[in-house]
Amino acid sequence: MVEVLLGKREVTSFAEEGTYGSFTNPTVIIKNARVEPQSSEDWQEILQAGSGVIYPTAQVGNKIRAFRLTYNPQDWRMLSFILGGSSLTDANPIYTHSYTGYDTDPVSFSLQRDIYASTHSVRKWDGCKVNTATLSWNIAGGGMTGRFVELALDCVAQDVSIATSASGSPSAASTDLFEAKHVQLTLNTSAVNELLSGTVVWENKLHDSMYADYASSGEISEPEPTVRRVSGTFLVHAQDNTFLDFQYNRVVVPGTNTLEFKRGTNDYLKLTFTNLRLTVPDTTTLDGPNIVDISWTADYAAAEVKDAISSYPDET
């Protein structure tokens, strides 16, 4: 019988890198992970090949190493690779990780995808940095991971290697995965209890860091964020004109505006928005409650995490 590779048997893990582009043995396993490589060898076409024929040829170009990583979070350590390092408040056994720096350059990480088989099939990415991150949830479920909260990271990497044995001894957290039922939205200091689904999108807009540099061997240098934007959506059942008033009065939403992913008093991610702005389509629904698909932007979203993990990547 021919053995085929099964996604269910993959173990995906990561670790913070001490030096950019230096593969570090992974320490943390993430669950329901799907890796979508987007790599190429950037073949450069030679139209006039000097052979008198009309067929072009090509020679290998730069290393384009990118991937999308999607998984269901059990904790929020990956935020350090999106927003930069956090500051720690130690109240053992509970720890608070605060992300408040506007201009922080996130550290890089290594990613390992170990596909179990008679002979393991392993991919090892180094120099991974997050360009765009999308956090999403849907109380109705759907897709491959149902009602779990999902985090999708669009990343660039310096290089990837293929191997038949994995590195390190990573382990998975023992906590539950976050679910849509753990989400709480607060707008203008009032809880929004009719929330159905939504997204938070962070964009780092990394510069491509590809230079004419012989020593680079066609690899990128470490990319850095150029503009960090935060935006997203909230899908809610409309009850009154509250959301619409914020748009047509042409004001930012007043009061306290937060989004929490909360499993308990000391187990949560809380985003606090600065200058939250809403765009509110006022659409008619004939076969049920009117649904408002709010698009939003904010100047900033400060992130606070409280959990039992004593150290996050690049934390001070």
Image (tube, rainbow, N blue to C red):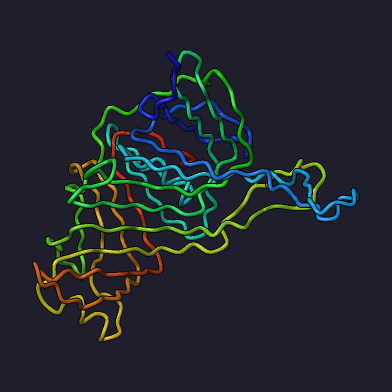
On the image, the x and y values in percent for residue 137 come to 26, 51
On the image, the x and y values in percent for residue 294 come to 26, 70
* Left or right position of 316 against 175: right
Q: Is residue 269 above or below residue 205?
A: above
- Give the number of marks: 0
Q: Nearer the viewer, residue 2 or 278?
A: 2
Location of the N terminus by quadrant is top left
Residue at the location (18% across, 67% down)?
189
On the image, the x and y values in percent for residue 237 come to 14, 66
* Left or right position of 12 against 131: left
On the image, the x and y values in percent for residue 180 come to 21, 48
Q: Is residue 291 above or below residue 7?
A: below
Residue at the location (41% across, 46% down)?
79
Q: Nearer the viewer, residue 289 or 155?
A: 289
User: Which residue ends up furthest to the bottom in the rendered image?
Assistant: 249
User: Image quarter for residue 190?
Assistant: bottom left
User: Image quarter for residue 128?
Assistant: top right
